[in-house]
Amino acid sequence: MSAEPLVYASQTARRARRTYAFLAAPDAERNGLRRVPVVIAGGGPCGLAMALDLARYGVECVVLERANCLSDGSRAICWAKRSLEFLDRLGAAAGLVARGVTWNVGKVFLGSAPEPIYTFDLLPEKDQKFPAFINLQQYYLEEALVERLAAEACVELRWQHAVKAVRQDAAGVTVDIGTPLGDYTLACDYLIAADGCRSTVRSLLGLDFAGRSFNDNFLIADIRMKAPFPAERRFWFDPPFNRGRTALMHRQPDDLWRLDFQLGPTVDRRAALEPAAVAAKVHGMLGAEIPFEYEWVSIYDFQCRRMERFVHGRVLFVGDAAHLVSPFGARGANGGLQDVDNLGWKLARVLAGRSPPALLDSYDVERCRAADENILNSARATDFMTAATPAAQAYRDAVLELARDFEFARPLVNSGRLSRPAVLDDSPLSTPEASTFEHAMRPGAPCVDAPLGSGWLLEKLGGRFVALHFAADDAAQRQVPAGVELVVVRPADDREGLAARRYDAAPGTTYLVRPDQHVCARWRAFDPHALDAAVKRATVH
Amino acid sequence: MITTPNLTDPDGFFAALMALHEGLSDAESRRLDARLVLLLANQIGDPAVLADVLAAARRASAAPELAPGAG
Ligand SMILES: Cc1cc2nc3c(=O)[nH]c(=O)nc-3n(C[C@H](O)[C@H](O)[C@H](O)COP(=O)(O)OP(=O)(O)OC[C@H]3O[C@@H](n4cnc5c(N)ncnc54)[C@H](O)[C@@H]3O)c2cc1C
C-alpha cells in the first residue's frame, strides 16, 4: 500500500511511539565470527511475536530492526480473539486487553437512517476467555512485545540494524547488516523475513509478490475527542457526509477514534488532505459541535498480494512480507500472527533435530492457503465497496436497498468479513477422522475456548502436543505416548458441559491438539496407538 | 435447473415485467433488475441450481444476437 502521511501536531502520539537506543554489535560479530540458530529481519508485530514464540521453545535468535522506534502512522487497531489467544500463550495478552477497547458488535448503516440496516455479533458463543476483538494501536502491541522480550535471555533485539544482503546455501544463511557504526555479518541456520510489505529480503532474493491493486482511495483520520459513542464497529454506505461512498468508525483507547472515508478512484491527494477538507468530513460524521484534535491523517490505496511460496530454502517469510491484504476485515496483522504461531513450533523442532526440515513444507502449504482465504475475503469486501463497474454498482446498491426491508439481503452486505482463524483443511499433518463427529472441530480447526474449572480450556493447550481426553468420571487416568501430554476434561471441571458440547465430545472422546492449538486428530475412544501414529504424522516421522 | 416451461401465464408475466420498468431511466432499470435477480436468487437458494442458472444466462448471451425486428 502507499500512503502519503500528513501529520498534525500531537505530542501525546509522539510520546506513545517510543524510540529505542542503538547498540553496536559485539566486536566478535563485526569480525564475522558468530552463528546463531535464527535471525529475524524486522521488528514489527510478526517479527517480535516470532522471537517471543521461539524463545518459549528455547531457540536463540537475533531480531534486526531497521528503525529506532515503534510503528508510526495509522496502522492496525483491531486484534482478533485468535491473536489474543496466541499472545496469551506468549504472556502478553492480559496487559493488552486491559489497555484496549473490547468490542463484539458491528453495525452497518445506510444513507441518513439513524438505525442500522444490519447488526452482527462476532462472538455468538460467549463464555470464552477473550472477546471477538479489542481495539488497540499497533504501537502499544509492539511496545508490550518489546517489554516481554527484554525478559528473554535467548533473544537479542537490535534497533537500527538493517538487513542489506542475504546469501544462502545448503548449510545456512549469511546476512549482511548495516548500522550507523558500519556493517557486519551474521550467520544463521534460518532467516525469518518479517520485514513488512516492502520486504528487503524478498527483493534481495528476487522473489515475486503477485496480486492486484484496488482503484480507490481511503482517507484515514485518527482523531482525539471525548465522545459518548459505544465501543462497536460502525460502517456507513452512502452517508450524507460522504455521499455515494463508505465510511467507518472505530473506538481506540486514549479517547482516540479511527475514521475512514472512501474517496473514490480519482482524487487530488493534496486537496483531500487540506485541514478544511478533512474537517468537513469529520464534522459531517460527528456533528458540527464536537471538538477534536488530529492525531494522524493520511490517504491510502490498498492491494492484495502474496508470494507464491513462503519457504525458500532456509529463508522463511511471515506476515506482510509474505502476503498483503486490504484492511477491511483486519486480516493483516491477525493473519501474520497466525503465520508466526504456525511456524514457531515447527522451526523449533527442526532446529532441535526432532523433525526433518520437511516439516517446514507444511508451514508453506497451510499458510499459503490461509493467505488465499484472507485475500479472498478482503478483496471481496473491497470490491463490494469500490464497485468498479456499473453492474457492480447496481448490484451493490440493490443489495443495500433490499437489506433495509428484507432480512435475506443482509448477509450480502459486505463491509468487511472480520478476521477468523483459518481452518487448516487437508493439512498434511492432520489424521483424517474415522468416526462421526459434528463438522466444526474437525482436524485442522483452531481450538475453541470454553470455561474449565476456575480457568479456561485454551490455557491448558498449546506449546506442545496435547491429548485432550473427555473423561466419564473424575478419577480417569490414561497412558499417553512419548511426546504428548495428557489433559483430562473431567465432568467436575466442565460443569455446564460447554467444553463437551463445543467439541462434540462424549465420555472417551480424545482430541490430539497441536502446539499451535489446531486440532490434529480426534477419536471417539482413547487409543494410545492411534495417538502415537497421529503425532508421528504431524511431526513428519 | 428447470428448462421446460414453468410459468403459468408467460405473456402476463412478461407484460408485468415491462410494466415494472415503465418510466424508469436506464440506471433505475438496471437497479430494479438487480433487486429482482437478488430476490429471485433467494427464492431458489440451492447453490447448484444457482450455478446452473448463472452459466445458462452467460451462454445465452454468447449466442449470435437477434436481428432487430426478427420474426
Ligand atoms: C490503515 C491500516 C489499518 C490496518 N488495520 C489493521 C487491523 O485493524 N488489524 C490487522 O490485523 N491489521 C491491520 N493492518 C495491517 C497491519 O498493520 C500489518 O499487517 C502489520 O503491520 C504486519 O506486521 P509485520 O510485522 O508483518 O510487518 P510490519 O509491521 O510492516 O513490520 C516490518 C518491520 O520490518 C522493518 N524492516 C523493513 N526492512 C528492514 C530491513 N531491511 N532490515 C531490518 N528491518 C527492516 C520495518 O522497519 C518494520 O518495523 C492495517 C494496515 C493499515 C495500513
Image (cartoon, coloured by chain):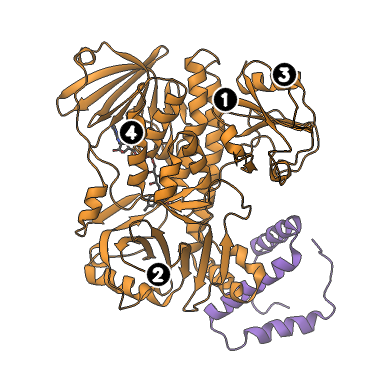
Chain colours: A orange, B purple
Say if disc 4 is inside 8 Å of ligand 1: yes
Whether labels 4 and 3 belong to a single chain: the reply is yes
Classify residue A336 as left or right of residue A293.
right
In the depicted structure, whether residue A355 falls above or below residue A463 = above
Any mark on residue A42, and which?
A: 4
* Residue that protrudes farthest toward the left in the picture: A181
Marks 3, 1: nearer the viewer:
3
Any mark on residue A464, and which?
A: 1
Q: The disc labelled 3 sits on which kind of residue?
A: Gln
Whether labels 2 and 4 belong to a single chain: the reply is yes
Classed neighbour count for the residue bearing mark 2: other residues with Cα under 10 Å, few (<14), some (14–19), many (≥20): few
Q: The disc labelled 1 sits on which kind of residue?
A: Arg
In the depicted structure, whether residue A115 falls above or below residue A51 = below
Considering only order in the chain, which callout, 3 or 4, is on the residue closer to the N terminus? 4
Classify residue B61 as left or right of residue A377.
right
Closest to the observer: A42 or A165?
A42
Q: The disc labelled 4 sits on which kind of residue?
A: Gly
Any mark on residue A228, and which?
A: 2
Q: For mark 4, give the secondary structure.
A: loop
Q: Quadrant of ligand 1?
A: top left
Considering only order in the chain, which callout, 4 or 2, is on the residue closer to the N terminus? 4
Classed neighbour count for the residue bearing mark 3: other residues with Cα under 10 Å, few (<14), some (14–19), many (≥20): few
Q: Is residue A195 in view? A: no
Q: Chain of mark 4?
A: A
Where's residue A362, x and y in %?
56, 27
Please report contact status of discs 2 and 4: CB closer than 8 Å, yes or no: no
Considering only order in the chain, which callout, 1 or 4, is on the residue closer to the N terminus? 4
Q: Chain of mark 1?
A: A
Classify residue A513 as left or right of residue A32.
right
Any mark on residue A479, and which?
A: 3
